[in-house]
Amino acid sequence: MDWLREVNFNEQGLIPVVAQDAASGRLLMVAWMNHEALQLTVKTKQVVYWSRSRKKLWKKGEQSGHIQRLHSIHLDCDADVLLVKVEQVGGAACHTGRESCFFRELQEVQGQLSWQITDDVLVDPKELYS
């Protein structure tokens, strides 16, 4: 697997991964992969991440059913960040039930800057993880 040797994993053996909707171009989430997660993603065509909090492989959607089907993988110029273009099955990439984890925008409201929620909840999070 010569291609895998070109990937610059960090000291913990991880690389950050940006997930983007292949059709709309919308940024969905940022997560991490290790060697095994990247190999499984390529092999199965379903995105697998490394959960830093649980310290185990995490097949996106394994509990919720909201999987990510792989369209393509891109490596940045320094070979230390991956971009995965995906089909987000079920519509919700975020554990909050929203399409994207990036659902808050810094906006000025009545002369004050504050984080405003810009996306509706598509799926009740209780339904995602029950």
Image (cartoon, rainbow, N blue to C red):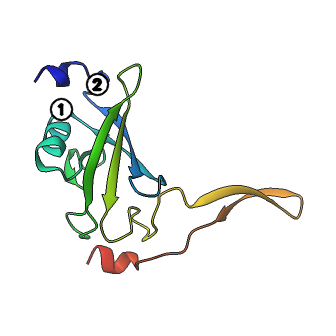
In front here: 32 or 76?
Answer: 76
Where residue 47 appears, as percent x and y from the top left, is: 23, 50
**What residue would you read off at disc 2?**
9
Where residue 89 appears, as percent x and y from the top left, is: 30, 66
- Spatial CA distance of label 1 from label 2 is 8 Å
Secondary structure, mark 2, is loop
Type of residue at label 1? His
Where residue 39 appears, as percent x and y from the top left, is: 14, 37
Picture residue at 46% right of the left edge, 68% below the top:
98
The image quadrant where one finds the C terminus is bottom left
Left or right, residue 2 beside residue 105: left
In front here: 105 or 72?
Answer: 72
Type of residue at label 2? Phe
Label 1 or label 2, whichever comes before in sequence order: 2
Res. 1 in view? yes
Res. 51 in view? no
Picture residue at 24% right of the left edge, 19% below the top:
6
Picture residue at 30% right of the left edge, 21% below the top:
8
**What residue would you read off at disc 1?**
35
Few, some or many residues within 10 Å of mark 2 (<14, 14–19, 20+): some
Image quarter for residue 126?
bottom left
Kindly check if marks 1 and 2 are in contact, taking CB atoms under 8 A apart as contact: yes
Count of all numbered marks drawn on residues in the image: 2
Work out whether 106 lies above or below 62.
Answer: above
In front here: 66 or 75?
Answer: 75
The image quadrant where one finds the N terminus is top left
Picture residue at 18% right of the left edge, 23% below the top:
3
Work out whether 101 lies above or below 126.
Answer: above
Image quarter for residue 103?
bottom right
Where residue 32 appears, as percent x and y from the top left, is: 32, 40
Secondary structure, mark 1, is helix
